[in-house]
Image (cartoon, rainbow, N blue to C red):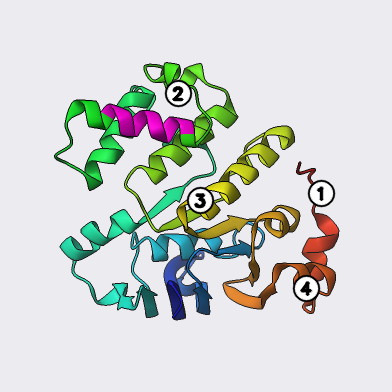
Amino acid sequence: MPYLELIDIKKYFTTKSSGLFSSSKEIVKAVDGVSLSIEEGKILGLVGESGCGKSTLSRLIMQLIEPTEGSIVLEGENLTDLKTNEIRSKRLDFQMIFQDPYASLNPRMTVWSTLSEAVLTRNPGLEKLELKEKVISLMEMVGLDHRFIRKYPHEFSGGQRQRIAIARALAPEPKLIIADEPVSALDVSIQSQILNLLKELVDNLNLTMLFISHDLSVVRYIADRVAVMYFGEIVELGDAESIMENPQHDYTKQLLNSVPKISVH
Protein backbone atom coordinates (compact mmCIF):
# COMPACT_ATOMS: atom_id res chain seq x y z
CA MET A 1 0.00 0.00 0.00
CA PRO A 2 1.40 3.47 -0.92
CA TYR A 3 2.24 5.78 1.97
CA LEU A 4 0.57 8.70 0.16
CA GLU A 5 -2.01 8.38 -2.58
CA LEU A 6 -3.80 11.11 -4.52
CA ILE A 7 -6.93 9.93 -6.29
CA ASP A 8 -8.36 12.11 -9.09
CA ILE A 9 -7.58 15.37 -7.26
CA LYS A 10 -9.12 18.52 -8.71
CA LYS A 11 -8.87 22.11 -7.52
CA TYR A 12 -10.81 24.73 -9.45
CA PHE A 13 -10.79 28.46 -8.71
CA THR A 14 -13.38 30.97 -9.92
CA THR A 15 -12.04 34.29 -11.17
CA LYS A 16 -13.93 37.35 -12.30
CA SER A 17 -13.07 39.12 -15.51
CA SER A 18 -14.75 42.44 -16.28
CA GLY A 19 -15.02 44.30 -19.54
CA LEU A 20 -16.28 47.78 -20.30
CA PHE A 21 -19.97 46.81 -20.24
CA SER A 22 -20.07 43.36 -18.62
CA SER A 23 -18.34 40.97 -16.25
CA SER A 24 -18.04 37.21 -16.36
CA LYS A 25 -16.77 34.36 -14.22
CA GLU A 26 -14.03 32.08 -15.38
CA ILE A 27 -13.05 28.66 -14.00
CA VAL A 28 -9.30 28.12 -13.52
CA LYS A 29 -8.38 24.44 -13.32
CA ALA A 30 -5.24 24.69 -11.14
CA VAL A 31 -5.17 20.93 -10.53
CA ASP A 32 -7.21 18.82 -12.92
CA GLY A 33 -7.65 15.12 -12.15
CA VAL A 34 -4.25 14.27 -10.65
CA SER A 35 -3.64 10.71 -9.43
CA LEU A 36 -0.26 9.90 -7.84
CA SER A 37 1.21 7.62 -5.22
CA ILE A 38 4.45 7.57 -3.21
CA GLU A 39 5.81 4.46 -1.54
CA GLU A 40 7.15 4.70 2.01
CA GLY A 41 10.81 5.74 2.13
CA LYS A 42 10.82 6.90 -1.51
CA ILE A 43 11.16 10.29 -3.22
CA LEU A 44 8.72 11.36 -5.93
CA GLY A 45 9.87 14.34 -7.99
CA LEU A 46 7.09 16.63 -9.23
CA VAL A 47 8.39 18.81 -12.04
CA GLY A 48 6.92 21.55 -14.19
CA GLU A 49 7.18 25.27 -14.92
CA SER A 50 5.79 27.99 -12.65
CA GLY A 51 2.01 28.15 -12.77
CA CYS A 52 1.48 24.50 -13.71
CA GLY A 53 -0.20 23.64 -10.36
CA LYS A 54 2.69 22.13 -8.39
CA SER A 55 2.43 24.42 -5.36
CA THR A 56 -1.37 24.20 -5.34
CA LEU A 57 -1.02 20.42 -5.20
CA SER A 58 1.38 20.68 -2.24
CA ARG A 59 -1.06 22.95 -0.38
CA LEU A 60 -3.82 20.40 -1.01
CA ILE A 61 -1.70 17.59 0.46
CA MET A 62 -0.88 19.77 3.48
CA GLN A 63 -4.63 20.36 3.94
CA LEU A 64 -4.14 24.12 3.71
CA ILE A 65 -6.85 24.23 1.03
CA GLU A 66 -9.64 21.79 0.23
CA PRO A 67 -9.89 19.94 -3.10
CA THR A 68 -12.86 20.56 -5.36
CA GLU A 69 -12.98 16.80 -5.94
CA GLY A 70 -10.93 13.70 -5.18
CA SER A 71 -9.25 12.00 -2.22
CA ILE A 72 -5.91 12.36 -0.43
CA VAL A 73 -5.06 9.13 1.39
CA LEU A 74 -2.21 9.03 3.92
CA GLU A 75 -1.35 5.63 5.41
CA GLY A 76 -4.75 4.33 4.35
CA GLU A 77 -6.65 7.25 5.94
CA ASN A 78 -8.62 9.65 3.76
CA LEU A 79 -7.54 13.13 4.88
CA THR A 80 -10.41 14.77 3.04
CA ASP A 81 -12.85 13.08 5.47
CA LEU A 82 -11.16 14.39 8.64
CA LYS A 83 -12.48 17.19 10.84
CA THR A 84 -10.40 20.33 11.47
CA ASN A 85 -9.06 19.21 14.87
CA GLU A 86 -8.19 15.76 13.45
CA ILE A 87 -6.30 17.39 10.57
CA ARG A 88 -4.38 19.57 13.02
CA SER A 89 -3.01 16.58 14.94
CA LYS A 90 -2.40 14.61 11.73
CA ARG A 91 -0.42 17.50 10.24
CA LEU A 92 2.53 16.70 12.51
CA ASP A 93 3.11 13.70 10.24
CA PHE A 94 3.73 15.88 7.18
CA GLN A 95 5.93 18.97 7.05
CA MET A 96 7.07 21.41 4.37
CA ILE A 97 10.41 22.87 3.32
CA PHE A 98 9.97 26.09 1.35
CA GLN A 99 11.89 27.78 -1.44
CA ASP A 100 13.05 30.84 0.49
CA PRO A 101 14.36 29.91 3.94
CA TYR A 102 14.75 33.56 4.96
CA ALA A 103 11.06 34.25 4.33
CA SER A 104 9.96 31.03 6.06
CA LEU A 105 11.99 31.65 9.26
CA ASN A 106 10.92 34.18 11.89
CA PRO A 107 13.70 36.84 11.91
CA ARG A 108 13.09 37.54 15.62
CA MET A 109 13.57 33.94 16.70
CA THR A 110 16.93 32.31 17.36
CA VAL A 111 17.74 28.81 16.12
CA TRP A 112 16.99 27.57 19.65
CA SER A 113 13.55 29.23 19.71
CA THR A 114 12.65 28.03 16.21
CA LEU A 115 13.67 24.41 16.74
CA SER A 116 12.53 24.01 20.35
CA GLU A 117 9.07 25.36 19.46
CA ALA A 118 8.81 22.80 16.63
CA VAL A 119 10.04 19.91 18.83
CA LEU A 120 7.42 20.74 21.49
CA THR A 121 4.56 20.39 19.00
CA ARG A 122 5.17 16.62 19.07
CA ASN A 123 6.58 16.34 22.61
CA PRO A 124 4.97 19.11 24.70
CA GLY A 125 6.07 17.72 28.08
CA LEU A 126 9.83 17.58 27.49
CA GLU A 127 12.16 18.73 30.24
CA LYS A 128 14.53 21.56 29.24
CA LEU A 129 17.67 19.39 29.27
CA GLU A 130 16.09 16.74 27.04
CA LEU A 131 14.69 19.48 24.79
CA LYS A 132 18.17 21.00 24.40
CA GLU A 133 19.61 17.58 23.53
CA LYS A 134 16.96 17.14 20.82
CA VAL A 135 17.64 20.58 19.35
CA ILE A 136 21.41 19.98 19.30
CA SER A 137 20.81 16.56 17.68
CA LEU A 138 18.67 18.21 14.97
CA MET A 139 21.38 20.79 14.28
CA GLU A 140 24.04 18.11 13.96
CA MET A 141 21.74 16.04 11.74
CA VAL A 142 21.58 18.86 9.18
CA GLY A 143 25.27 19.76 9.45
CA LEU A 144 25.08 22.86 11.67
CA ASP A 145 27.45 23.58 14.55
CA HIS A 146 25.45 23.59 17.80
CA ARG A 147 27.39 26.67 18.91
CA PHE A 148 25.15 28.65 16.51
CA ILE A 149 22.12 27.81 18.67
CA ARG A 150 21.58 31.40 19.90
CA LYS A 151 22.03 33.07 16.50
CA TYR A 152 19.30 34.67 14.36
CA PRO A 153 18.45 33.88 10.71
CA HIS A 154 20.13 37.03 9.33
CA GLU A 155 23.46 35.85 10.76
CA PHE A 156 23.53 32.80 8.45
CA SER A 157 24.19 32.21 4.75
CA GLY A 158 21.37 31.06 2.45
CA GLY A 159 22.51 27.45 2.60
CA GLN A 160 22.75 27.52 6.39
CA ARG A 161 19.27 29.05 6.66
CA GLN A 162 17.89 26.24 4.52
CA ARG A 163 19.54 23.73 6.86
CA ILE A 164 17.73 25.41 9.78
CA ALA A 165 14.45 25.20 7.85
CA ILE A 166 15.09 21.49 7.19
CA ALA A 167 15.82 20.91 10.89
CA ARG A 168 12.57 22.67 11.79
CA ALA A 169 10.65 20.43 9.38
CA LEU A 170 12.23 17.35 10.99
CA ALA A 171 11.59 18.53 14.58
CA PRO A 172 7.99 17.21 14.87
CA GLU A 173 9.26 13.78 13.67
CA PRO A 174 7.20 13.70 10.44
CA LYS A 175 6.89 10.75 8.09
CA LEU A 176 6.28 12.82 4.94
CA ILE A 177 8.27 15.85 3.78
CA ILE A 178 7.02 18.13 1.00
CA ALA A 179 10.00 20.06 -0.35
CA ASP A 180 8.75 22.92 -2.55
CA GLU A 181 11.65 24.21 -4.70
CA PRO A 182 14.04 23.85 -1.72
CA VAL A 183 17.24 24.58 -3.67
CA SER A 184 16.16 26.99 -6.41
CA ALA A 185 16.97 30.11 -4.32
CA LEU A 186 20.49 28.84 -3.53
CA ASP A 187 23.81 29.15 -5.36
CA VAL A 188 24.55 26.18 -7.62
CA SER A 189 27.51 25.17 -5.43
CA ILE A 190 25.23 25.01 -2.38
CA GLN A 191 22.37 23.23 -4.21
CA SER A 192 24.32 19.98 -4.40
CA GLN A 193 25.08 20.04 -0.66
CA ILE A 194 21.40 20.45 0.24
CA LEU A 195 20.33 17.75 -2.24
CA ASN A 196 22.84 15.33 -0.73
CA LEU A 197 21.62 16.20 2.76
CA LEU A 198 17.97 15.56 1.80
CA LYS A 199 18.83 12.19 0.24
CA GLU A 200 20.79 11.22 3.33
CA LEU A 201 17.92 12.20 5.66
CA VAL A 202 15.37 10.24 3.61
CA ASP A 203 17.58 7.14 3.81
CA ASN A 204 18.53 7.48 7.48
CA LEU A 205 15.08 8.41 8.82
CA ASN A 206 13.01 6.37 6.34
CA LEU A 207 11.19 9.53 5.27
CA THR A 208 8.80 9.73 2.33
CA MET A 209 9.28 12.86 0.20
CA LEU A 210 7.49 14.84 -2.48
CA PHE A 211 10.21 16.95 -4.09
CA ILE A 212 8.85 19.82 -6.21
CA SER A 213 11.02 21.60 -8.77
CA HIS A 214 10.99 23.30 -12.16
CA ASP A 215 14.39 21.73 -12.92
CA LEU A 216 14.47 18.19 -14.28
CA SER A 217 18.21 17.85 -13.75
CA VAL A 218 17.75 18.45 -10.01
CA VAL A 219 14.83 16.02 -9.85
CA ARG A 220 16.79 13.39 -11.74
CA TYR A 221 19.48 13.39 -9.08
CA ILE A 222 17.25 13.11 -6.03
CA ALA A 223 14.04 11.32 -7.08
CA ASP A 224 13.21 7.63 -7.50
CA ARG A 225 10.21 8.43 -9.70
CA VAL A 226 9.19 11.56 -11.59
CA ALA A 227 5.80 13.08 -12.37
CA VAL A 228 5.70 15.83 -15.00
CA MET A 229 2.93 18.41 -14.51
CA TYR A 230 1.56 20.63 -17.26
CA PHE A 231 -1.47 22.94 -16.93
CA GLY A 232 -2.78 21.13 -13.87
CA GLU A 233 -2.40 17.60 -15.25
CA ILE A 234 0.23 14.86 -14.95
CA VAL A 235 1.39 14.27 -18.51
CA GLU A 236 4.17 11.79 -17.78
CA LEU A 237 4.97 9.53 -14.82
CA GLY A 238 7.66 6.92 -14.37
CA ASP A 239 11.12 5.93 -13.22
CA ALA A 240 13.45 8.96 -13.05
CA GLU A 241 16.16 7.53 -15.31
CA SER A 242 13.76 6.26 -17.97
CA ILE A 243 12.00 9.62 -18.20
CA MET A 244 15.33 11.42 -18.53
CA GLU A 245 16.69 8.99 -21.11
CA ASN A 246 13.49 8.37 -23.07
CA PRO A 247 10.85 11.09 -22.50
CA GLN A 248 7.52 10.41 -24.20
CA HIS A 249 5.61 13.68 -23.90
CA ASP A 250 6.55 16.77 -25.92
CA TYR A 251 6.43 18.95 -22.79
CA THR A 252 8.91 16.68 -20.98
CA LYS A 253 11.24 16.89 -23.98
CA GLN A 254 10.92 20.68 -23.91
CA LEU A 255 11.80 20.77 -20.19
CA LEU A 256 14.84 18.58 -20.78
CA ASN A 257 16.10 20.86 -23.53
CA SER A 258 15.61 24.07 -21.55
CA VAL A 259 17.04 23.38 -18.09
CA PRO A 260 20.69 23.93 -17.18
CA LYS A 261 22.63 21.01 -15.77
CA ILE A 262 23.85 21.19 -12.17
CA SER A 263 26.98 19.58 -10.88
CA VAL A 264 26.30 17.28 -7.93
CA HIS A 265 29.21 15.80 -6.01
What is the magenta range? 132-140
For label 2, the residue is 153
Q: Is residue 14 above or below residue 127?
A: below
First reached walking from the N terminus: tag 3 or tag 1? 3
Disc 3 versus disc 4: nearer the observer? 3
Q: Are marks 1 and 4 in contact (CB under 8 Å)?
A: no
Q: Which residue appears at 66% of the width and 37% of the height?
A: 193
In the rendered image, the quadrant that contains the C terminus is top right
Q: Secondary structure at mark 3?
A: helix
As measured in the structure, the alpha-carbon distance from the residue carrying label 3 to the one carrying label 1 is 30 Å
Q: Closer to the N terminus: mark 3 or mark 4?
A: 3
Residue pointed to by mark 3: 204
Give the mark toward the camera: 3 or 1: 3
Front one among 68 and 205: 205
Which numbered disc flags the more N-terminal residue, 2 or 3? 2
- Position of residue 234 measured from the top left corner of the image (x, y, whole percent): 61, 76
Alpha carbon separation for disc pair 3 and 4: 26 Å
Left or right relative to 152: residue 55: right
Gap between marks 1 and 2 measured at Cα: 30 Å
Q: Which residue is mark 1?
A: 260
Amino acid at dot 1: Pro
On the image, the x and y values in percent for residue 84 come to 19, 64
Label number found at residue 1: none
**Does the CB distance between marks 2 and 4 fall below 8 Å?**
no
Taking the magenta stretch, the answer to whether it contains residue 139 is: yes
